[in-house]
Image: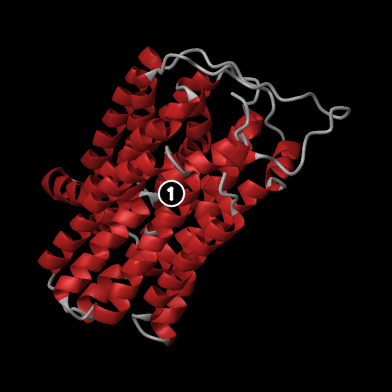
Amino acid sequence: MSQTAIGVADATLDDAASPAPSVPKERSDPAWGAVLSLTLGVFGLVTTEFLPASLLTPLATDLGVSEGAAGQAVTATAVVAAVTAPTLAILTRTIDRRHVMWGLTVLLVASNLLAAFATSLPMLLLARVVLGVGLGGFWAMSGAIAMRLVPAAMLPRAMSIILTGVSVATVCAAPIGAYLGDLWGWRATFLLGAVIGVLTLAVQLATIPRLPPLDVASVRALFDVGRNRMIRIGLIAILLVASGNFAGFTYVRTFLEQVPVLDIETISLVLLAFGVAGFFGNLAGGFVAGRSLRLALSLAPLIMAVAALILVIAGASPLFAAIGIALWGFGFGGVPVSVQTWMIRAAPEQAESAGGLMVTAFQVAIASGAVFGGLLVDHVGVLGPFVLFGLAALSAAIVVALLTPRH
């Protein structure tokens, strides 16, 4: 695949110091079965990532620890994923990529089994560390692998299909996890996650073709990718959008309880609307990204900024609060597919390194957004994080629109 105009790098490799990167030949026949197997992998990983949030109380009680201590299971996964994402491609650069993906799915199964049979907090944290390795590696490499499974023109569609797994997991994981945890117990819920992982592995074994390594992943490749102007624009957009999003979303329940004063049943329905809207936003994002990445990556945060404005100005109305939350979900649903397509088209010869930087940026943004959102809640009030959310999303839209060439 030749490098597209949107991804012209500012810096090139020094041929005297390192070999020229191998560029995979573009496929003429899309391997949709393999793409679907990546969708299942994303669904399993994100579902498992979200499970502790919906099972926190019984999990903490059973392990004899506080809910705050048990909540560190989520932190452990995020930290490990941030470190793993940019380094795994380097550590596995001589291994067939299908074998790497199979191994990452095995880690998903192992993590769920360790969690299901955990007898202490350290054992649970070990399970979440294992998940972090699988999560960071899978996210970093899925876009690069998708690029090798379908023709270039079909890449946005493929990414939209893969990221549908995120949307479905976002909608289903928390409520289904809570329900099954109450019905069967939290350990059985993690066992179900292991079953999903086994089924995913079976589909991957049957569908993912041979994908010899391109042998370009290295520490130097990370620095080369970081000097790519379009990659830098993508990373800035990620940091702004994700930090603003999670500054607000971390405290969305508090907002809905205090501003429009909704009861818990209504809050659940509003959050369900967020997830459903995100599913359709993902599909719309893939459609727009197939026509203009510049438009896709500026329009999604602009929609989010409008949603934040509605929540800040008219959020006291239950109707407008619900509209704002749904619009927010729709806008954010278009972000992952736009960002992933942007990053791998900006550096197709170094897509795995670009994917690693993208995942790290997301994890840093999630953590910083939650921290700044908490400070604003404590010192300004519950509207503070949503003002930050709106300003950050608007800034991302402006950065992409002004700094990116039209073609």
Q: Quadrant of residue 223?
A: top right
Residue drawn where x is 19% and y is 72% of the image: 320
Residue 112 in view here: no
Q: Residues within 10 Å of mark 1 (few under 14, many from 20)?
A: many
Q: Residue at x 49, y 34 (%)?
A: 143
For image coordinates 73% across by 41% down, the residue present is: 224
Query: Considering depth in this image, is 22 or 99 the residue closer to the camera?
Result: 22
The answer to whether residue 3 of the structure is visible from this angle is yes
In the image, what residue occupies the spot 21% across and 72% down?
A: 321
Q: Quadrant of the C terminus?
A: top right
What kind of element bears circle 1?
Answer: helix
Q: Which of 65 and 335 lies nearest the eye of the viewer?
A: 335
Query: What coloring was used for the rendering?
Result: secondary structure
Tell me the residue that label 1 is attached to.
296
Residue 269, by quadrant, is bottom left
Give left or right: position of 173 versus 133.
left
Percent position of residue 64, x then y? 31, 58
Q: Out of 261 and 273, give the one closest to the viewer.
A: 273
Q: Quadrant of the N terminus?
A: top right
Q: Residue 105: percent from the left, percent from the top?
A: 41, 28
> Looking at the picture, how far across and down is residue 243, in whole percent?
48, 63
Q: Against 160, is 152 above or below?
A: above
* Count of numbered badges drawn on the protein: 1
Tell me: 75 left or right of 350. left
Q: Amino acid at mark 1?
A: Ala
Residue at the right extreme of this rendering: 16
